[in-house]
Image (tube, rainbow, N blue to C red):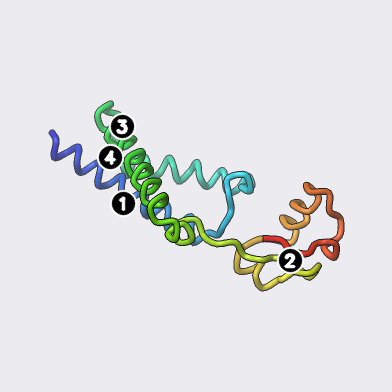
Amino acid sequence: MWFDLSVYAGKTAVVLLYFFLGMRLLGKRQVAQFNIYDLATLIAIANAVQNAMSGGKGDLAIGLVCSSTLIGIGWFFTKLLVKAPAAQGLVFGTPTILVSDGKVLEDRMHRERVTQEELETAMRQHGIVDAGAISLVF
């Protein structure tokens, strides 16, 4: 019984690592910046990995082991980041300048997967109409 539960914990850790790496590869978006496609993708991934973590079983013990593993890994990384602040750049990424002295840096926007429309939406949300009025945007 305990061996079976440890297998589920291991599967959960692997899925979380895979998901984390996938999200890092997708760019530096934060949840508040997700569009409807991003949210739908996240929900679909959650449904897909739930079966990978629990083997499609709805047992309470398996659900508790999987969720406890996720919480435990989150706690571990929080402690690690508090003790090693330099690791935050690796985990969360570092800011990238998208607009400098009123000039939109297209190559950086492309690298960070930010569209012109997303930039303009963010500008409007902050009451800015013209990119020329911006000195720096991360």
Mark 2 or mark 4, whichever is nearer to me: 2
Circle 3: is it few (<14), some (14-19), or many (20+) Cα within 10 Å?
some
Q: What residue is rendered at 78% in x and 56% in y?
A: 120
CA separation in Å, label 4 and label 3: 10 Å
CA separation in Å, label 2 and label 4: 47 Å
The residue nearer to you, when weighing 130 against 60, is 130
Q: Earlier in the sequence, mark 1 or mark 3?
A: 1
x, y percent for residue 71: 36, 38
Q: Secondary structure at mark 1?
A: helix
What type is the residue that disc 2 sits on? Val
What label does residue 25 carry, if any? none
CA separation in Å, label 1 and label 2: 37 Å
What label does residue 63 carry, if any? 3
Q: Earlier in the sequence, mark 4 or mark 1?
A: 1
The answer to whether mark 1 and mark 3 are in CB contact below 8 A is no
What label does residue 55 carry, if any? 4
Mark 4 or mark 3, whichever is nearer to me: 3
The quadrant the N terminus occupies is: top left
Residue picked out by circle 1: 14
Residue picked out by circle 2: 99
Q: What residue is rendered at 42% in x and 59% in y?
A: 87
